[in-house]
Amino acid sequence: MKKRIAVLAGDGIGPEIVPAAIKVLEAVGTKCGHSFDFVSAAVGGQAIDDTGWPLPDDTLNLAKTSDAVLLGAVGGPKWEGLDYERRPERALLGLREMLGLFANLRPAKLYSELADASTLKREVIDGIDVLVVRELTGGIYFGKPKGVEATATGHRGFNTEVYTTEEITRIAKIAFEAARKRRKLVHSIDKANVLESSELWRKVVIEVHKGYPDVELRHMYVDNCAMQLIRNPKQFDVIVTTNLFGDILSDEAAMLTGSIGMLPSASVGAKVGMYEPIHGSAPDIAGKDMANPIGMIASGAMMLRYSFDLGKEADLIENAIQKILAQGYRTKDIEAPGTKLVGTKDMGELILKQLGQS
Ligand code: NAD
């Protein structure tokens, strides 16, 4: 297989962690007979410094004409004073919109070796493997009318939660398809006891489910789901939900696993998928060889699985990560007594070496 991958390293720790992911993907390619062509472009603050805009046309064109996008992180204190439209984070919204990425996939999988780094008890979280499928381009963040207007006594702020049959159908399909490659269970999360938009959500998900009789579907209200994720997270396989509920629940699920530096994500929907760790540019540790590159490397594994259908190759990467953790190597964010502290570069090299041995 031959693929072209757009590499947008971005700001802060982005340029430190992206090279590790590229090396690992190159090694898997060589091992399994695939050729990956990596083409870099500027994004975020780096692009603002070069061109004045966070998502220059050249970068967008490269993303659109590649087979997938690998993104580090954007943002930092240097650009915080800029207008909202010119801030580094606008590049992410632009890429999502222009690439038609309506589904965000966030796995929260616990490596058993890190169970003690979580705030929850080992027996509650050991073995959790949840995939949150969040609708990304609809719902209350985009619905109209919205705004703040004057009233006789002060102001009134309002947003509108809107979902159409088409939007719910396509995200439900992504969730059922993903469940087919996993443990075949989907929890659809809504607030159908209160919200009309959720009533439609539930009705459409039930309809789409008819095409997936091999997958089990359960419904849960969002408040109960927030509680169940803490009480018994192992009951979940795939969670599918709206933009707003997914924003909150995916962060909650992520924290079950201990460190923000460990977790990858995928945004998919149309031809080109985008893969990035869930964390930001971590300006507080940038340039110090302290960042955990595992979320970035695991994002590369997700790219192989979801964009290129290379599940076995993705497993190779995830197994190499697990073996290195089992050997006791840790970056600062996941360090524990009795473990071996390493920097960003060394962690990347260790995973690469492990891959060569498997
Ligand atoms: P952050 O995720 O960058 O950092 C939060 C904390 O987690 C920091 O203490 C940081 O050191 C730590 N951390 C993050 N990634 C780590 C890693 N790989 N290894 C070890 N520790 C890690 O969030 P923030 O501080 O709120 O935001 C910093 C900047 O990043 C802001 O400009 C924000 O807008 C931007 N941001 C970008 C993205 C993105 O590019 N997708 C996402 C979130 C925030």
Image (cartoon, helix red, strand yellow):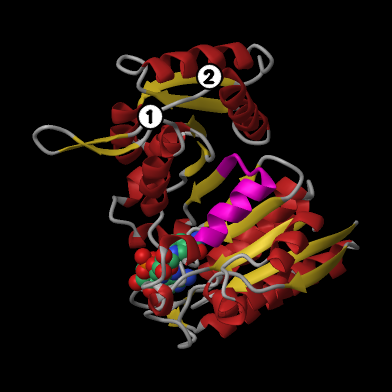
Labelled pair 2, 1 in contact (Cβ < 8 Å): no
Residue 103: percent from left, percent from top: 59, 40
Find numbered disc 2 in the image and state the secondary structure of the residue it sits on: strand
User: What residue is rendered at 68% in x and 48% in y?
Assistant: 99
Q: Is residue 271 visible?
A: yes
Pick the quarter of the image with the C terminus: bottom right
SS assignment for the magenta stretch, majority:
helix
Pick the quarter of the image with the N terminus: bottom right
**Residue type at numbered disc 1:** Thr
User: What residue is rendered at 78% in x and 71% in y?
Assistant: 39
Q: Magenta span covers which residues? A: 89-104
**Between 77 and 207, which is closer to the camera in this rendering?**
77
**Label 1 packing within 10 angstroms: few (<14), some (14-19), many (20+):** some
**Between 122 and 259, which is closer to the camera in this rendering?**
259
Residue at the spot of label 1: 160
State whether residue 85 is above or below residue 184.
below
Q: Nearer the viewer, mark 2 or mark 1?
A: 1
State whether residue 143 is above or below residue 253.
above
Q: Is residue 67 visible?
A: no
Which numbered marker is on residue 306? none
User: What residue is rendered at 49% in x and 83% in y?
Assistant: 342
**Label 2 packing within 10 angstroms: few (<14), some (14-19), many (20+):** some
Find the residue positioned furthest to the bottom.
288
Query: Quick check: is 150 in the magenta stretch?
Result: no
Find numbered disc 1 in the image and state the secondary structure of the residue it sits on: loop
**Residue type at numbered disc 2:** Leu
- Which quadrant of the render holds ligand 1? bottom left
Residue at the spot of label 2: 217
Gap between marks 2 and 1, in whole Å? 28 Å
Residue 193: percent from left, percent from top: 31, 14
Say if disc 2 is inside 8 Å of ligand 1. no
